[in-house]
Amino acid sequence: ALGTDVVVATIEAPKADAVIIGRPVHEALVEAMSRMKRQRAFLMVSSSLLKNTDVVEKVKQTLDSKYVGLYEGMPPHTPREAVIEATLEARKCGADVIVTIGGGSLTDAAKAVQIALAHDITDTEALGQLRLAAPKRLPYRDLTVRQIAVPTTLSAGEFTNFAGVTDSRRKVKEPYGHRQSAPQVIILDPSLALHTPLSLWLSTGLRAVDHAVEALCSSASHPYAAVLASGGLRLLAKGLQRCKAEPCDVAARQLCQLGMWQAVQAAVLAGGGASHAIGHTLG
């Protein structure tokens, strides 16, 4: 039963082709790459997961010859310079899929890397010409290298095709987006989430709650969005309280992941409100 045992499933989903829930990441990646018909995986991973756990090593061993390279860490707010570094490394490795294992900055970075690879971008100025607000934005090409996202927080950026990338020179975080830049497959592994510090898990959980509340209060909301938002709130309320009481409760972590998924879908359907506008302004 949901909330007592970990539910395992592969679910067809909007934006993403599929969301794989409940399976260990190193096993789920095999299914994801087979589904996408991809053979050369470039990993972009959290520094803490790489240094303090065996998660990344298990992934590399499982992928075997399909693992071609790794980029470690991502500075907060995803600076253009780091996006270019990862792009050049992925291109050098001949990657055909990017696998992100970590939080929102890594997820956003890989979305931008996909765009940069498709447009032969090699420097930060050229990358800036692809931002959504660029005065003479270059026409977008189809993406050839795609993304598998394995989130470790509840920020939910993997469920949208938009990314925030910071222009370090101007100290401005700017939106990037492409109709194909949402991750093609998302893996929600509740056991992996146990490695996320509780304070980070709960704080990003409140962001997921904010998605649901914003969808419910939006003037553009509608019954379908409201059902998703209400359902997401119920799962988040139960899951976050249980995680606070017992941080090692895997089933509670899954409740939070499923609540986050419903909440962000509701927010996308209902459109952003004041909370998101303030957040984008503050960065």
Image (spheres, helix red, strand yellow):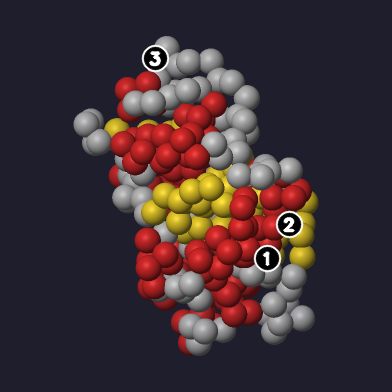
Residue drawn at point x = 36 percent, y = 44 percent: 78
Give the labeled residue for mark 2. 31
Q: In the structure shown, which secondary structural element does the residue marked by tag 3 occupy?
A: loop
Three-letter amino acid code at disc 1? Glu
- Please tell me which residue lies in front, 234 or 127: 127
Q: Nearer the viewer, mark 3 or mark 2?
A: 2
Q: Earlier in the sequence, mark 3 or mark 1?
A: 1
Which residue is pictured at 42% across the width and 12% down the height? 136
Residue 239 image-quadrant placement: bottom right
Q: Quadrant of residue 140?
A: top right
Which residue is label 3 attached to? 135
**Are dots 1 and 2 in contact, CB under 8 Å?**
yes
Looking at the image, which is closer to me, 262 or 184?
Answer: 184
Tag 2's secondary structure? helix
Specify few, some or many for label 3: CA neighbours under 10 Å numbering under 14, 14-19, or 20 or more. Answer: few
C-alpha gap between disc 1 and disc 2: 7 Å
Q: Which residue is mark 1?
A: 27
The location of residue 231, given as percent across then percent down, is 67, 64
* 188 in relation to 240, above or below: above
Amino acid type at circle 3 is Pro
Report the Cα–Cα distance between label 3 and label 2.
41 Å
Mark 2 Cα within 10 Å, few/some/many (few <14, many 20+)? Answer: some
Q: Is residue 1 above or below residue 40?
A: below
Q: Residue furthest left?
A: 169
Residue 253 placement, left or right of 206: right
Residue that sits furthest to the top in the current view: 136
Quadrant position of the N terminus in the picture = bottom right
